Amino acid sequence: MIISRSSQLLLLLLLILLAPASTCAAAANATRSAKQQQHRPNADDKPHQAAALIVFGDSIVDPGNNNGINTIIKADFPPYGDDFLNHRPTGRFCNGRIPTDFIASRLGLKDYLPPYLSPQPLDTHDLITGVSFASGGTGFDPLTPKLASVISLPDQLTMFHEYLGKVRAAAGDDKASEILSRGVFAICAGSDDIANTYFTMRARSEYDHASYANLLVQHASSFVEDLIRAGGRRVAFIGIPPIGCVPSQRTMSGGLERGCSQGHNEVAVAYNAGMVRELAALRAKYPGTLLVFMDIYGFLYDMMMHPRSYGFKQSTKGCCGTGLLEVSVLCNRVTSAVCDPVGDYLFWDSYHPTEKAYKILADFVYENYVKLII
């Protein structure tokens, strides 16, 4: 199905009209229950492999920071969270846990990485073991968070400085220094820049694919350098996946056969190659920094092209509703039925993978990249 420019704008209008009332209270309750039941290491446990996990980025790693801000880019309502603790939505754009929850667990820190903007005050344990500043809908292009009314990456870095002040107040300067030197700093963004700002909104029409990829590389490398200057020493930078093969982009740009959008993927490939070069330059400039580029493009592409090899039956449609376009407020309990069984699906909605898929991806990332910097 080919969707015209006018139809795309109509879709955006529908997102606003169909937005349900915020259920921040439910998200707060779910977060509270998760904290009460999660594993907390004690003196008999193995030492942590990292001091903390600190995350910046978009909806892939947003555990609920968007719940309390004025944006329609939210996931704090059913069926999001169907398979999370107590079957409650938390603001995670998934049916359950997201990649950073799994990584935090494998690092021996905790089972659920909380949002920095949690409606419940974060206790000392959560502060010193890490938080996520990620905001669904954001990106490296300065236009992207403005178009979605979400938190920009520079603002996430500002919150990080605020966070360090809270750590110092709660646990002392030595703990803050330990987080900076031994914490894992993960950055995951860029997909919304390509899918939304560049292609759907056409907000950078003066750029061709190569020049837009270069624009993203400039802003992304600048963010990484700002984080290093802020004290981060173990940085894991996640590349952009084959965004042209997610269900929504197949529907909007993949033609009658709903194939992968080659244009989306071309920008992603060019961006990833550019970031590999930029990160190499930053390693040379800051020799005391452990900086790794997490290349997930090929792994996810293989999952999408050969789903049965990974235990899935469907990889071109999401589990929510028709699976063609439903995401965020269009994926809701009123208008969208949920597939059964969820485990057959690679994607939860038309943009975000299921918990099962995220677990497979997190294991790949941990074994191949995170281990290099802990």
Image (cartoon, rainbow, N blue to C red):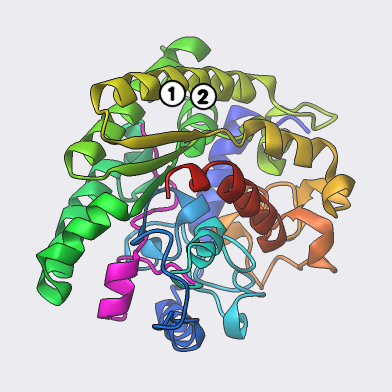
Q: Residue at x 84, y 53 (%)?
A: 312
Q: Is residue 205 visible?
A: no
Q: Residue at x 71, y 61 (%)?
A: 356
99 with respect to 153 (left or right):
right
Q: Residues within 10 Å of mark 2 (few under 14, many from 20)?
A: many
Q: Amino acid at mark 1?
A: Met
Residue 214: image x %, image y %? 41, 16
In this picture, is 91 found above or below 191?
below
Residue at the disc numbered 2:
272
Residue 178: image x %, image y %? 23, 59
Q: How many numbered marks, from 0 up?
A: 2
Give the secondary structure at mark 2. Answer: helix
Structural distance between the alpha carbons of marks 2 and 1? 5 Å
Give the secondary structure at mark 1. Answer: helix
Q: Main secondary structure of the magenta part?
A: loop
Residue 62: image x %, image y %? 45, 58
| Residue 133 position by quadrant | bottom left
Task: Give whichever of 46, 71 is nearer the camera.
Answer: 46
134 with respect to 255 (left or right):
left
Q: Residue at x 19, y 45 (%)?
A: 231
Residue at the disc numbered 1:
275
Q: Is residue 309 visible?
A: yes
Q: Which residues are magenta?
A: 112-140
